[in-house]
Amino acid sequence: MSATSLENKYSEQGPGIKIDPGLGYSAFDADSHYYEAEDCLTRHLPKEWRRRGPKWALINGRKRLLLGDHLYNYIPDPTFSQLGKPGAAHDYFGAKLDGKSLADVMGDLEPCRAEYRDRDVRLQTMDSQGLGAAWMFPTLGVTLEVTYKDDLEASLATIRSFNRWVEDDWGFAYKDRIFGVPLISFSDPKWAVEELEYLISKGVKIVSMRNGPVYTANGTTSPGAPEFDPFWARCEEAGVIMAPHAGDDGYDFLGRMWEPWADRTGFHVTPMSKCVTSQRAVPDFFAALVCHRVFERFPKLRVASIENGAAWVAPLLVRLFRGHAQVKGYYKKNPVDQFHENIWVTPFWEDNVADLAKVMPVERILFGSDYPHLEGVEAPLDFVSELDSFNAVDKRKIMRDNIVALTETANV
């Protein structure tokens, strides 16, 4: 789709938007976040789920979240009362060797800003940042399923309740600028289709799910297993984008296998756990979609990898091709071509985006800032500096046109 046909879509140069002179247009952020309100899981939770559902408890003087009988530990303070500033851990995640821990680099915490919880205030912030539009993802929401894997019914009830909160507070296409992203679980295939149908009826354009094997009543399985075909078929038919987002992917068991003694609370991390868990679930998840031939059955399906980085892409493409070459007749179409045609990727700011463009079409690369998380950039357009090697046309594709083309053709 040409830049001309995208003029003025999603407030490209709308009134009040501070246009970066180096770009000449507003950017479209594929990875923005809010910090959830404390009732995000309970506001719409039916009464019958209150015992097995989420609840707050005061434990040792701290407000803690319980998911059923399980203490939630993934985010140290899920009330989000005090937060690190956007981009505070920029250098830490860039592996700058200054000897500081993640807790050290967070610095002074601040109260939750209004823009993190109020969509109208967020639009004003986006204006000042030069953003025309953004996909808006959960912070807490993408970390729930693993803790809840022993009670799938309660997990599904909580996710549905959360999605209704997203609809309330952020909307699925608010003023055609903020696109709230609800969650889907595959733990019950029928439930997944029912929830998707509701979301489609409300105008949703993007849905998200956990990067990892599906938790079911009978154990784990692949998101590419045949029982999920009705869901993928409906996504394809409606043009809804599936955007798996980083969160608790459930791969911490690898760290426990190698270091059963390690402290895993809060921000504690060890070099071994980094080696065996970092970006392991993501390539496995996308390999499952390709290897289990989801895209052969649904060739118009669109999947966008959000906040999962890009360092995993090239090695996965090598493995996919080797499987194609060594298992003759398995695929109807080269799996690397399937990946290129059906999958979009948001690189981290610390990735080498030029290297990614050597193995992925530039039309499949999306700008994602991760604002306002501390591991992202301080301001969304700081990401532009990582694109110095790209010409103006390709830079615009990454910063705006690719995601506009996805969004405007979703659920129309």
Image (spheres, helix red, strand yellow):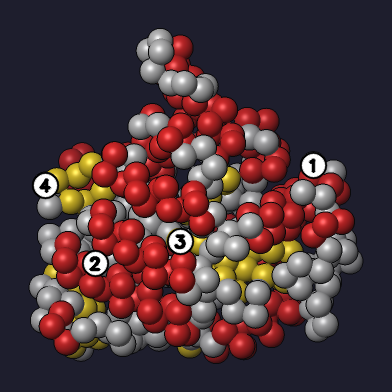
Identify the residue under disc 1: 389
Q: For the residues marked 1 and 2, what is the alpha-carbon distance in whole angstroms?
A: 45 Å
Q: For the residues marked 4 and 1, what is the alpha-carbon distance in whole angstroms?
A: 49 Å
Q: Which mark is residue 156?
A: 2
- Please rate how many residues cluster around mark 3, counting C-alpha atoms within 10 Å: few if below 14, some from 14 to 19, many from 20: many
SS state under label 4: loop
Q: Give the amino acid at mark 2.
A: Leu
SS state under label 3: strand
Identify the residue under disc 4: 218
Percent position of residue 396, x then y:
79, 53
Residue 284 visible in the displayed image: no
Percent position of residue 104, x then y:
45, 67
Mark toward the start of the polypeptide (4 vs 1): 4
- Please rate how many residues cluster around mark 1, counting C-alpha atoms within 10 Å: few if below 14, some from 14 to 19, many from 20: few
Q: Give the amino acid at mark 4.
A: Asn
Q: For the residues marked 3 and 1, what is the alpha-carbon distance in whole angstroms?
A: 32 Å
Identify the residue under disc 3: 207
Mark toward the start of the polypeptide (4 vs 2): 2
Percent position of residue 83, x then y:
46, 79
Residue at figure coordinates x 30%, y 77% from the top left: 161
Q: Quadrant of the C terminus?
A: bottom right
